[in-house]
Amino acid sequence: MTEKKRRIGLIGGTFNPIHNAHLMMAQAACEQFQLDEVWFMPLKKPPHKNEDEIVSEEHRCRMVQFAIDGIGPFSLSDMELKRKGTTYTCETLAQCVEEYPQAKFYFILGGDSLKDFDKWFCPQEIVRLCTVLAVSRGTMSEEELAHRCQELSEQFHGDFLPVCMPTVSISSAEIRGRLLRHESVAGYVPEKVLRYIGIHRLYGADFHSFSKKEKELLADLAATLRPERYLHTLGVAYTAANLAACFMEGEEEVKKARKAGLLHDCAKYLTANEMLNLCDKYGVILTQCERENPALVHGKLGAYLAKQRYGMKDEICSAIACHTTGKPKMTTLEKILYVADFIEPGRKLDCKPYSLPEVRKQSFRDLERGLFMTLENTVNYLQRTNIPIDELTFQTYSYYKDKTNNKK
């Protein structure tokens, strides 16, 4: 018995931005043709579009990922983005078939694209490699779509099949235009994508005001951070608030610790190059070690974003800025955030010389002792893995090592 081939749908596009019609097309194709998966493939350099209107690959990929998160069969593919120069569908399909010979591919496109399909680059090759699924998005009636599919099937001796879907007239160009005119696009794009566009002022959008309420802040983070990073953020905020309840006085101090925890990784979703470029743009001063190890940069950049984007006070921003390296003579809030980042409930670390349960237990008894144990574990890990130690981290470790020894 031959093994059943996986049925994989491909939906390509600039996704500038991705919108609800894209998701509805993929869902309709998935259900009507029993597809096992649908891959969303952002294009690198569409041959028919003005590059000046296209936001960065990173922005477009993040928007796609946020749009499809939680939808089982949907996934993001960066295959097109990895290729150099102008990309063509026939070349992408050839690569897919070569890399996944046990799969059967279905290329999903809109009825507007179907009209000019015979003018595409090597259309015969596309039809040879896949089944084309065509979805009307309001530009063609069902009868016109079925007729065009029949015409192309006969012309290219392949399979062009219509996908039934309610008429939805949404285009990325229309969304960009509405944003530029400061008009609402609610219902056009997924909520997380809409918030992401607002946070980054994409397409001329300026409707996103500084979030003061924690509910709005959480929504911003959920629309920017990847799910595992978002869960880590919630864990740090929870732990920081509990530590503040033990070692600081007053409800306001607990709130500050929670806000610092929520925002400590607010820049972590950016790529290394993006972080370095933004630091240069905003005048955030970095050491040579930080430039060579961008994993350290998100603290300082996060502090800048926390102040400029969310209006956080200096004491919270200072805690965020030093949560990656630490610093001598840390404030109580700075110590709390540094420790909370290490011991939050979601962490699973095989650390030395102190186990994670030891550090957690000690941190709630003696914050400074917990801080030193965290620093010693961090330095130990950096030395074992031959990762360069930032000078400020070494100064912090030495400072608290001396303080700990002097207490004995």
Image: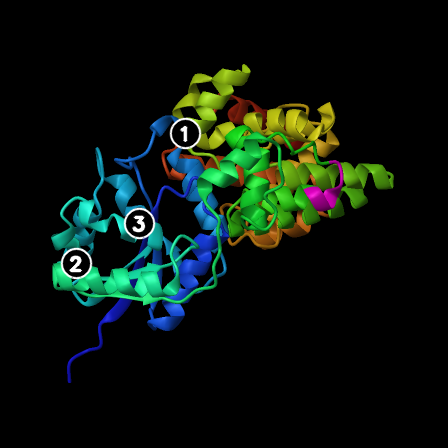
What type of secondary structure mainly makes up the magenta span? helix
Q: Kindly identify the amino acid type of the residue bearing the numbered disc 2.
A: Val
> Of marks 3 and 1, which one's residue comes earlier in the chain?
1
Front residue of 327 and 87 = 87
Residue 48 pos. (x, y %): 28, 35
Residue type pointed to by label 1: Glu
Which of the image's four quarters has the N terminus?
A: bottom left
In the rendered image of this protein, does residue 133 appear above or below residue 382? Answer: below
Q: Residues within 10 Å of mark 1 (few under 14, many from 20)?
A: few
First in sequence: mark 1 vs mark 2: 1
How far apart marks 3 and 2 lie (CA) works out to 14 Å
Relative to 395, is 34 above or below?
Answer: below
Task: Give the residue at mark 3.
Answer: 113
Amino acid type of the residue that numbered disc 3 sits on in the rendered structure: Ser
Q: Quick check: is 383 in the magenta stretch?
A: no
Q: Which residue is mark 2?
A: 127
Magenta-tinted stretch: 212-216
Q: Position of residue 89 (x, y in %)?
A: 22, 48
Mark 2, secondary structure of its residue: helix
